[in-house]
Amino acid sequence: MPYSGEPWFPKGTVLFSRSRAAYELLEDLGPGHHGERALLALRRLKGEARGRFILKVVPLPAVTAGLKLARKRLEEEVTLATYLRHPSIARVYGLHRAMGALYIITESVAGCSLNTLVEVALARGRHFPESFMLYVGAQIAGALAHAHTCRSEKGEPLHIVHRAIDPTRIRVTLTGQAKLTDFGLASAHLPGRKSVRLPRARGEVYWASPEALFGEPENARSDLFVLGMVLLEFATGKHLLSAPDMLTEDLWALVPEGARDRLNGAITRAQDEWAGVDPEDTILRAATFTPEDVECATEKLSEPTRAIFRKLLQRNPAERYTSASALQEDMTKALRERGNYDGAKAAQEIRRALQRAGEAFAAEEDGAESAFSQDDITTEPAPV
């Protein structure tokens, strides 16, 4: 992957100026999905701080085939973002060329990722309330409903699929607004061009739908399955495609004889696409989990919520929710039945959890170094 080594610039470097504002480097976040570099920058206007932004950058001119591909993918991401205007989708603000580089300026969502909130829950020994999960889930389902139904200026469907939903890409602000970030790996039918958004090089193996793991086509229902897995772990601490009490040979024993060659092929393909990751156990679990496993994982949740997960976490995409809007409707209904719950309550819950988690860490021997003073999970990309 191009430019995966040492940081390009020292902290404090003014990277460029735009609309009379200067963008100052705060942190190099490392390589992105396609060979670009991701940076966290502070925007200053007349010397005063005016917010943080994630910058994706590739050098100009793009002299290698890898960099040319990276540049085209970033340009497509900006084009895609022109259709993604929703309060629960992190914004992409556009392109900027400066200092021999091409930058994409994207929103840095202040607050906590679900990944951090899971860690907070572990620290305090208690999961977030079911209502909190439903509140966040309904907002993200609304974001996906918008993305999945986007159309071009001519009214043609864009078939946008996020393909990389995971706990780091769902963030909740300290005012209680949930946002889905990073459509950098999304597939889409962009109008008037041959896309480089090929059906490969997805997000994490651990957060992939069965069809993605099997090397089959993904669609909007694939996003819904992965969202279901993320919310299940957040609500219960259990990951559907993880079977920690089972050995690899135990999982193979559950596979019908006629399906073994297909799964071996899927494992080989996944090893090529997700370099450095062993996908075998995850793929085997995706091929063998049962409705009883879903029942067991959700046993401590209310019946309306369990019914939602039963429909979300189906191996066969045709048996899942037909749309994200249908999921949003069911989550909103389940939340309404539990009483009023809004952003103010979600924000209060986050503040209370962070405080208690901080106290728990402070009680540990090295707690002063481990306390949650800030959320260190950035919008994206995850370091590789």
Image (tube, grey):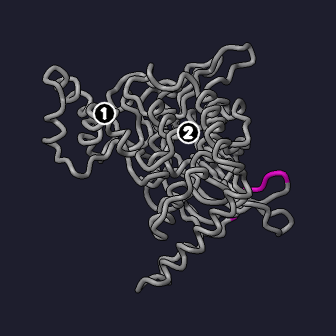
Disc ID at residue 290:
1
Residue 272 in view here: no
Residue indicated by mark 2? 184
Locate residue 353, reporting x and y percent: 58, 67
Q: Quadrant of residue 304?
A: top right
Quarter of the picture holding the N terminus: top left
Locate residue 328, reporting x and y percent: 63, 34
Q: Give the prevailing secondary structure in the magenta stretch.
A: strand
Q: Is residue 15 left or right of residue 298?
A: right
How packed mark 1 is, by other alpha carbons closer than 10 Å (few <14, some 14-19, many 20 or more), is some
Region rendered in magenta: 14-19
Frontmost residue, 88 versus 49: 88
- Element under label 1? loop
Residue 254 in view here: yes
| Residue type at numbered disc 2 | Gly
Pointer 1 or 2: first along the chain: 2
In space, the residues marked 1 and 2 are separated at their CA atoms by 32 Å
Frontmost residue, 351 versus 2: 351
Which residue does the image show at 60% across and 50% down from the upper left? 131
Is 58 located above or below residue 189 in the figure?
A: below
Locate residue 381, reporting x and y percent: 52, 50
Disc ID at residue 75:
none
Which residue does the image show at 60% across and 74% down from the upper left? 355
How packed mark 2 is, by other alpha carbons closer than 10 Å (few <14, some 14-19, many 20 or more), is many
| Residue type at numbered disc 1 | Thr
Nearer the observer: mark 1 or 2; the answer is: 1
